Image (cartoon, grey):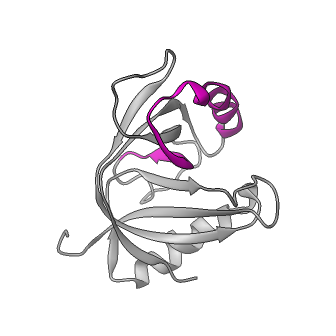
């Protein structure tokens, strides 16, 4: 599984967020909360949804499934002029990402993440960068379907910091 390396421009997102851990995963609840209100979001760009994770620095160095992180259910917008009640804004700063195409049920993705962070990254010449991780859920995303597709975006930098 080889990624494409992509320089991401800044993105403006609107959505909802929750604090969770891998052992106390509230992803279903987050998306169930977000989806009914997404039609209220004006100025959306495209139909892709963004599942964004914000981890504390060194989160994966001493991995503990009980350590909490922030997870967002979002859609991209052109501006933050109108934000629906109960929703918040998030700006994804630009930067370098390794983009992996994942096919399969969302609940089976853990092995892919283990490969990316445990095998690909240490042998890639890149380091994990301290920026949000996200999955882009496009028209081929179908949650638990075995033919579902999504893009996994992992923030990276070279060893000299760029």
Quarter placement of the N terminus: bottom right
Q: Residue at x 23, y 75 (%)?
A: 159
Q: Residue at x 65, y 39 (%)?
A: 27
Q: Position of residue 95 (x, y in %)?
A: 28, 61
Q: Position of residue 48 (x, y in %)?
A: 56, 50
Number of marks in picture: 0
- Nearest the viewer among 24 and 90 is 90
Q: Residue at x 30, y 51 (%)?
A: 10
Q: Magenta includes 126?
A: no
Taking the image as shown, residue 44 lies to the left or right of residue 162, namely right
Quarter placement of the C terminus: bottom left
Q: Magenta includes 51?
A: yes
Q: Is residue 112 above or below residue 27?
A: below
Q: Is residue 24 visible?
A: no
Q: Residue at x 79, y 67 (%)?
A: 147
Q: Which residues fall within the magenta stretch?
A: 27-56
Q: Is residue 107 visible?
A: yes
Quadrant housing residue 107:
bottom right
Q: Is residue 70 above or below residue 136?
A: above
Q: Position of residue 138 (x, y in %)?
A: 61, 56
Q: Position of residue 7 (x, y in %)?
A: 31, 67
Taking the image as shown, residue 3 lies to the left or right of residue 57, namely right
Q: Residue furthest top?
A: 85
Taking the image as shown, residue 81 lies to the left or right of residue 134, namely left
- Nearest the viewer among 53 and 31 is 31
Quadrant housing residue 91:
top left
């Amino acid at each position: 599984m080889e990624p494409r390396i992509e320089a991401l421009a800044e993105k403006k997102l609107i959505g909802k967020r929750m604090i969770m851990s891998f052992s106390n995963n509230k992803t279903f609840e987050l998306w169930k909360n977000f989806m009914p209100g997404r039609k209220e979001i004006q100025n959306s760009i495209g139909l892709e949804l963004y599942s964004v994770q914000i981890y504390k620095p060194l989160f994966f160095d001493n991995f503990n499934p009980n350590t909490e992180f922030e997870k967002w259910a979002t859609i991209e917008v052109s501006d933050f002029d109108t934000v629906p009640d109960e929703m918040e804004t998030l700006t994804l700063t630009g930067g370098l990402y390794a983009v992996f195409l994942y096919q399969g049920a969302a609940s089976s993705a853990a092995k892919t993440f283990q490969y990316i962070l445990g095998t690909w990254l240490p042998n890639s010449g890149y380091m994990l960068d301290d920026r949000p991780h996200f999955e882009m859920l496009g028209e081929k995303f179908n949650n638990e379907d075995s033919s579902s597709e999504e893009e996994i975006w992992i923030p990276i930098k070279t060893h000299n910091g760029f």
